[in-house]
Amino acid sequence: MKVSAFIATSLDGYIAKPDGDINWLMEADNSDAKEDYGYKEFSDSIDCMVMGRNTMEMVMSFPEWPYENKRVIVLSNTLKIVPSQLKDKVEFYSGSLIKLVTQLKNEGCKRLYIDGGKTIQAFINEELLTDITITTIPILLGEGLSLFGKTIHDIKLKLLESNSYPSGFVKSTYEIDDV
Amino acid sequence: MKVSAFIATSLDGYIAKPDGDINWLMEADNSDAKEDYGYKEFSDSIDCMVMGRNTMEMVMSFPEWPYENKRVIVLSNTLKIVPSQLKDKVEFYSGSLIKLVTQLKNEGCKRLYIDGGKTIQAFINEELLTDITITTIPILLGEGLSLFGKTIHDIKLKLLESNSYPSGFVKSTYEIDDV
């Protein structure tokens, strides 16, 4: 099973401003092209998602729930009851990530999409993430929420591909390990 | 005059380990090719360099002083006397960076090479850097000395080019502003 992240960061490595604001990201693409930077292809390749509570709450603020056909697991130690607007759309999980990954694999998941900075960091630190696609936006934010955090040791990656776009975005996909 | 940085970072944005160690960088290129990632071309294009004292001390530990044909300015508020082994090789400077840039421009410098994390950050924050080439190494260090620091406001850049190499390095050049 592949366990994948697909995320945008500023050139200085932030996924959001200190307060979680991502408007800078929404405004970054000034090109005319209806370019999705490979997101639809990625999205079509995944059947299950794991995100943190913060990401769930951000996504709930969007006009529509964008993951209708995916199984979505939300990591939370405190939430137990799914909000009514997300009934049948998400499941809550609290506990070991390796157990969760094993369980989802046994239940037939082919590719997991890991979203949110803290969640991605946790999957990296438990050596569960198999690949990460980073789209680098040509902006320095100067401060914010980091994509990466402290790791116990160096982690070597393998570049699978890298492409740049007329907007100045650079998308690179790295392989880490296979679960 | 162009004011340029040319530097390698880990995928998580560090130019060195917390103690300044860059062995991870020296060991990162396992490819057979004698690839210099555009360094010679860049080096040939610059006539003056500005670096911090830490960078000078690191470069002094190399077998040879690599900047024989460049005018090298070392920023230091405390050092006044050039070490004997660097006599006629470096000048010390303490004071305003904008004054330094103006002075070097008036003295005929065509392209300045700004080296070292703190020095690059200072030039960015004073809006003096015109372009930066970042070679991203496919490794997560987890902690270390950051290439970028806090900025007063968002800084938008323009991607000039991006290339990837068989080693997995990704080199991207961004334009900031023209002095």
Image: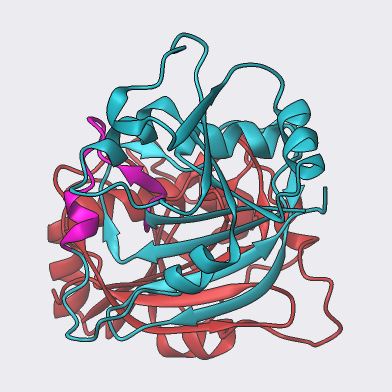
Chain colours: A cyan, B red
Q: Position of residue A88 (x, y in %)?
A: 44, 34
Q: Is residue B37 left or right of residue A128?
A: left
Q: Is the residue A122 above or below the residue B140 in the image?
A: above
Q: Residue B20 is drawn in which quadrant?
A: top right
Q: Is residue A106 left or right of residue A163?
A: right
Question: Residue visible at 50% across and 18% down?
Answer: A76
> Is any part of residue B75 visible from this angle?
no
The magenta segment is A10-27
Q: Residue B155 is drawn in which quadrant?
A: bottom left
Q: Is the residue A89 above or below the residue A110 in the image?
A: above
Question: Residue visible at 22% across and 72% down?
Answer: B104
Q: Position of residue A17 (x, y in %)?
A: 25, 39
Q: Is residue B10 left or right of residue B25?
A: left
- Report the front residue among B177 and A40: A40
Q: Residue A59 is drawn in which quadrant?
A: top left
> Is any part of residue A49 visible from this angle?
yes
Q: Position of residue A171 (x, y in %)?
A: 47, 71
